[in-house]
Image: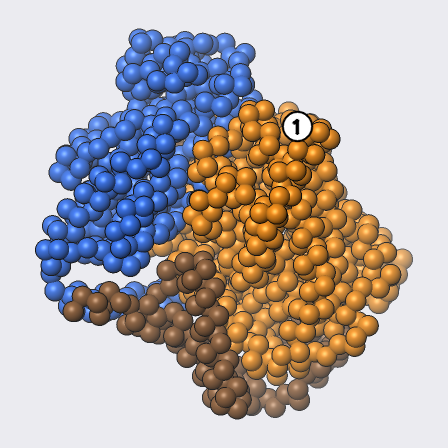
Chain colours: A brown, B orange, C blue
């Protein structure tokens, strides 16, 4: 709903198009409830050996409750539309006044950038086993600063190199975390 | 008592111990700032480093790390909505909003001051009346803890804003997700689809890094990136008004934190959430909580701080851990050949009192370190977001990996980053989800234990415990109170206005 | 949200597998004078601060004190009563630079639950210690010996704590039930929690390791009913506590702690680690550990350890039938 915040200032009733995401959300919630409810039948309600409450109890109760609550939400959504007043309370990310400054959002450019960043995250995840953790992440930094943000090359390079060095010192030298090394694993080359 | 403390300070204030305490606090702050790496991991990783030290020095340094990381975790939560630990999730609510409104300096400063005050009060209580509290804590068996966890779940009401049903739904999702993995009672693997990686459950630290850090980052990108925040010089510092408002909130937070910290197994995360909930109920400014109010920053931080010190009540008096980190510290005791237990105070007075004295010193160092640094840290927000956000991604992913040395953690962060982003766009409250996730396993453990004690039945045991009934009554009040108030209010005021 | 997660997992798994194969193809069989180099991980399937973690840190430190050109780092991979860590260790197949510090639950967990491994999926190197349990109760408990406890349990179930369904505590319960006692078991996360519960009078008796129970017996908070060892402890405080057998019960609990390596490592690698651990067990760190924690020293190596595990597994099958 906050997506439509620019054209609907606050208290006006939600336009139709902001209702379908809520419907989808409530349906997903109902689905989650159903899945856990049905799934709980694979486990005993009571642990046989000692008669204590078994592994099925909590998911079955919570799952059915969630189903009921989600159906109630759906019903309310159909009846009265999205409730805007006080929605989310403290979690409202824009703040009621939206006083913080933002660069003038060029819709298309912003959406594309969001998509690129979103896709680059799982791609980095896939690269880590090959390149090793720190090189893959340094590459990600370089890609984001240079290609996505179009920063000056020396700024981008400094940032990426800085990330590499600081993370290496912190995680590998100080905290001795065995980060994945990928092809840079000495075991791969040392044996030859 | 005083004699003992003098001995303790004598032991703690040697130049060498002071130095290591300082190094510990500094290291801890850094570890706390890194997302994912919490105090428990930090202490565990650094135990081998301290093996060659004198036991007291080593423990002082480890305690320094403990205190430092509790505090460091809130710094990034306030600045970039990236909680370093589960207990600092709450700091993202008001602290981050204060930072976005250009008041990062005061937010960090009040957090440091509040934490110190709370720690100081908790430590005084720890050194004077610890055995008394330990005795009370022992009376908290499974039925009483079950009631406490139920009360914790009821705070979802506070965190779901106006939409109670939605909050309840997300809280239930949190509970359901927390049932994935090996069940506490019977040991049965649940919803694991034979994936051994899921046996340990979905780790909430990683889920939180995803939901908050990556989710907020994608949200900022969606909104066309936040501009760097330049603050006026005078906005960097606390005002008298800030202090006046923070004082009662600190007191409430300290109390909530201390009580929950004393109970074995309740933990500081729950304390921070409940302290925030208490503010939303009882603070004079309760309507402003959630929009960047100073009470919403200082109360949970005070609770975390006093809770993490109160954790040492069961640790030192009874020799049983009060939380995850104190469990690791107990392990460290063993490494140095010190057997924790009821005789610890008698057998090792210098060590225990030295350690207690070092807690005072460590918290003082923390304050001296962080109060002047608060305006400096606030300058981080002047960095352009186009450089800042890649850094947030990198530290989140490496930090998540180091929690368990597992790539699964990295994937969890990424997936829940998208979930968090979707929730932000749909304006779904994240807090109930986190609360359900944290309390779910604790609630179920208490439930199973209670039913084991009652030979299958839970309610008779609950009904026979006065304490449990009182807590349940409080929970009922929490849920029904606002409903009644709202009913009355909508009758009298046709259009309730949020603006104070 | 699950399908993308799982495909992602599968994809990353495939990647790991690919690089894993690359490692295998690139490295020929290790030479006869093979020694580990650089960093060696010692995996523990339990959280920092517990008994397993402690034993792993002792082994790691003793090995590092040999100064043999490698650096052992303890890695905690807790979750699922050990299942997560041990399943992870399976992926180290053929890696001579990885050690596993494990214990009894490696036998019992696969018997009770559907996990993708058994102790046979790893190469046993050395069993370095044995531990047992003792049983403690509040001072005012109506029984003074385990025999009386079992009798009381036969009349009316006694509430007993347990730190896990696959650990030593569950063996204690099984032994007592074999002797006719009935217990209602309250599950806890660790021995520390069990002892707290006993202090708070939530449970009536608690099984615990000698090391963790000793301070409470010494302080007079608890009385010791019996030990489940073969012989009494050689200890000023616990030396008076009779064994369950002395009290006429057919009950004894032995749990092992040992070092294992991944499956499929070369002969030379196995032999190297066996002799390295043997040398490390000469250290003061190790001897202090055995003494402080009231453990029973053990030094079964290679085939002997393997044989022991086979027998132990048969016993456990009897217990958990």
Residue extending furthest right? Answer: B492
Percent x, y of residue C261: 22, 48
Query: Compared to C142, does B63 lie above or below?
Result: below
Percent x, y of residue A175: 45, 58
Percent x, y of residue C33: 13, 55
Going by the image, does B491 lie left or right of A111? right
Q: Quadrant of residue C12?
A: bottom left
* Identity of the residue drawn at 50% across and 57% down: B37
Percent x, y of residue B240: 87, 61
How many numbered badges does the structure rendering display? 1
Nearer the observer, B338 or B41: B338
Q: Quadrant of the N terminus of chain C?
A: bottom left
Going by the image, does C69 lie left or right of A159? left
Tell me if I can see residue B313 in this picture: no
SS at mark 1 in the image: helix
Few, some or many residues within 10 Å of mark 1 (<14, 14–19, 20+): some
Nearer the observer, B323 or C270: C270
* Identity of the residue drawn at 47% across and 88% down: A147
Read off the residue under disc 1. B131
């Amino acid at each position: 709903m906050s997506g439509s915040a620019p054209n609907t200032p606050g208290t006006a009733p939600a336009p139709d198009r902001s209702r379908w995401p809520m419907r989808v959300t409530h349906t997903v919630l109902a689905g989650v409830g159903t899945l856990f409810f049905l799934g709980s039948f694979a486990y005993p309600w009571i642990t046989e050996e000692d008669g204590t409450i078994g592994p099925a109890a909590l998911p079955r109760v919570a799952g059915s409750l969630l189903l009921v609550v989600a159906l109630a939400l759906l019903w309310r959504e159909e009846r009265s539309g999205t409730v805007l007043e006080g929605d989310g309370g403290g979690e409202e990310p824009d703040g009621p006044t939206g006083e913080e400054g933002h660069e003038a959002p060029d819709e298309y450019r912003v959406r594309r950038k969001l998509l690129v960043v979103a896709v680059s995250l799982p791609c980095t995840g896939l690269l880590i086993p090959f390149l090793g953790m720190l090189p893959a992440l340094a590459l990600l930094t370089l890609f984001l600063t240079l290609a996505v943000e179009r920063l000056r090359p020396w700024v981008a390079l400094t940032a990426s190199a800085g990330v590499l060095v600081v993370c290496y010192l912190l995680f590998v030298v100080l905290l001795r975390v065995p980060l994945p090394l990928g092809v840079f694993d000495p075991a791969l080359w040392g044996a030859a | 008592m005083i004699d003992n403390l003098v001995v303790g300070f004598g032991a703690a204030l040697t130049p060498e111990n002071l130095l290591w305490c300082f190094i510990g606090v500094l290291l801890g702050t850094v570890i706390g700032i890194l997302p994912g790496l919490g105090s428990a991991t930090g202490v565990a990783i650094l135990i081998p480093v301290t093996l060659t030290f004198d036991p007291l020095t080593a423990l002082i340094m480890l305690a320094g790390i403990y205190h430092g990381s509790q505090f460091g975790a809130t710094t990034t939560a306030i600045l970039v909505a990236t909680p370093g630990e589960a207990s600092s999730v709450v700091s993202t609510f008001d602290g981050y909003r204060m930072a976005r409104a250009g008041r990062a300096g005061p937010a960090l400063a009040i957090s440091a001051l509040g934490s110190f005050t709370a720690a100081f009060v908790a430590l005084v209580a720890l050194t004077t009346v610890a055995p008394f509290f330990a005795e009370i804590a022992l009376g908290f068996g499974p039925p009483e803890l079950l009631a406490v966890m139920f009360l914790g779940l009821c705070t979802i009401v506070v965190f779901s804003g106006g939409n109670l049903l939605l909050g309840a739904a997300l809280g239930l999702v949190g509970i359901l997700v927390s049932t994935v993995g090996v069940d506490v009672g019977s040991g049965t693997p649940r919803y694991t689809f034979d994936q051994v990686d899921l046996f340990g459950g979905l780790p909430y630290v990683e889920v939180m890094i995803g939901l908050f850090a990556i989710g907020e980052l994608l949200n900022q990108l969606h909104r066309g990136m936040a501009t760097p925040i330049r603050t006026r010089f005078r906005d960097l510092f606390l005002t008298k008004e800030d202090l006046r408002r923070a004082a009662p909130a600190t007191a409430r937070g300290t109390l909530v934190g201390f009580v929950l910290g004393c109970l074995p197994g309740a933990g500081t995360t729950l304390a921070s959430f409940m302290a925030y909930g208490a503010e939303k109920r009882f603070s004079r400014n309760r309507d402003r909580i959630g929009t960047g109010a100073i009470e919403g920053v200082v109360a949970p931080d005070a609770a975390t701080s006093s809770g993490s010190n109160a954790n040492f009540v069961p640790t030192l008096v009874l020799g049983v851990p009060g939380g995850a980190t104190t469990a690791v510290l107990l392990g460290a005791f063993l490494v140095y050949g010190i057997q924790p237990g009821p005789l610890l105070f008698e057998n090792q007075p210098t060590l225990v009192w030295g350690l207690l004295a070092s807690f005072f010193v460590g918290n003082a160092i923390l304050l001296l370190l962080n109060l002047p640094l608060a305006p400096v840290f606030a300058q981080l927000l002047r960095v352009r977001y186009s450089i800042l956000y890649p850094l947030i991604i990198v530290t989140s992913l490496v930090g998540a990996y180091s929690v368990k040395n597992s790539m699964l953690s990295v994937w969890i962060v990424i997936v829940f980053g998208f979930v968090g982003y979707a929730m932000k766009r749909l304006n779904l409250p994240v807090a109930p989800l986190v609360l359900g996730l944290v309390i779910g396993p604790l609630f179920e453990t208490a439930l199973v234990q209670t039913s084991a004690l009652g030979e299958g039945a839970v309610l008779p045991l609950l009904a026979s415990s006065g304490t449990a009934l009182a807590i349940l009554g409080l929970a009922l009040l929490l849920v029904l109170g606002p409903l009644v108030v709202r009913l009355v209010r909508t009758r009298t005021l046709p259009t309730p206005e949020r603006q104070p | 949200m699950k399908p993308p997660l799982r495909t992602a997992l599968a994809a990353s798994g495939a990647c790991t597998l690919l690089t894993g194969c690359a490692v295998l193809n690139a490295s020929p069989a290790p030479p006869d004078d093979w020694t580990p180099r650089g960093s060696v991980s010692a995996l523990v399937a339990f959280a920092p601060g517990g008994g397993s973690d402690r034993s792993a840190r002792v082994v790691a430190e003793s090995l590092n004190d040999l100064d043999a050109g490698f650096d052992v780092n303890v890695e905690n991979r807790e979750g699922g009563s050990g299942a997560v860590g041990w399943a992870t260790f399976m992926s180290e197949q053929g890696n001579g630079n990885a050690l596993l510090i494990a214990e009894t639950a490696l036998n019992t967990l696969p018997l009770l639950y559907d996990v993708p491994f058994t102790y046979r999926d790893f190469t046993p190197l050395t069993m370095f210690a044995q531990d047992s349990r003792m049983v403690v109760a509040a001072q005012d408990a109506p029984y003074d010996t385990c025999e009386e406890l079992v009798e009381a349990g036969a009349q009316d179930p006694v509430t007993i704590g347990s730190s896990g369904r696959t650990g030593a505590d569950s063996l204690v319960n099984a032994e007592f039930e074999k002797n006719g006692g009935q217990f209602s078991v309250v599950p806890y996360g660790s021995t520390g929690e069990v002892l707290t519960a006993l202090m708070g009078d939530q449970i009536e008796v608690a099984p615990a390791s000698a090391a963790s129970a000793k301070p409470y017996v010494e302080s007079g908070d608890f009385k010791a009913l019996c030990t489940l060892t073969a012989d009494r402890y050689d200890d000023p405080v616990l030396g008076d506590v009779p064994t369950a057998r002395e009290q006429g019960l057919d009950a004894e609990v032995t749990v092992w702690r040992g070092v294992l390596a991944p499956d499929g490592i070369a002969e030379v690698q196995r032999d190297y680690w066996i002799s390295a651990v043997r040398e490390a067990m000469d250290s003061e760190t190790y001897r202090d550990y055995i003494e402080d924690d009231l453990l029973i020293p053990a030094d079964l190596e290679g085939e002997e350890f393997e044989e022991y595990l086979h027998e132990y597994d048969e016993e456990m099958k009897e217990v958990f039938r």
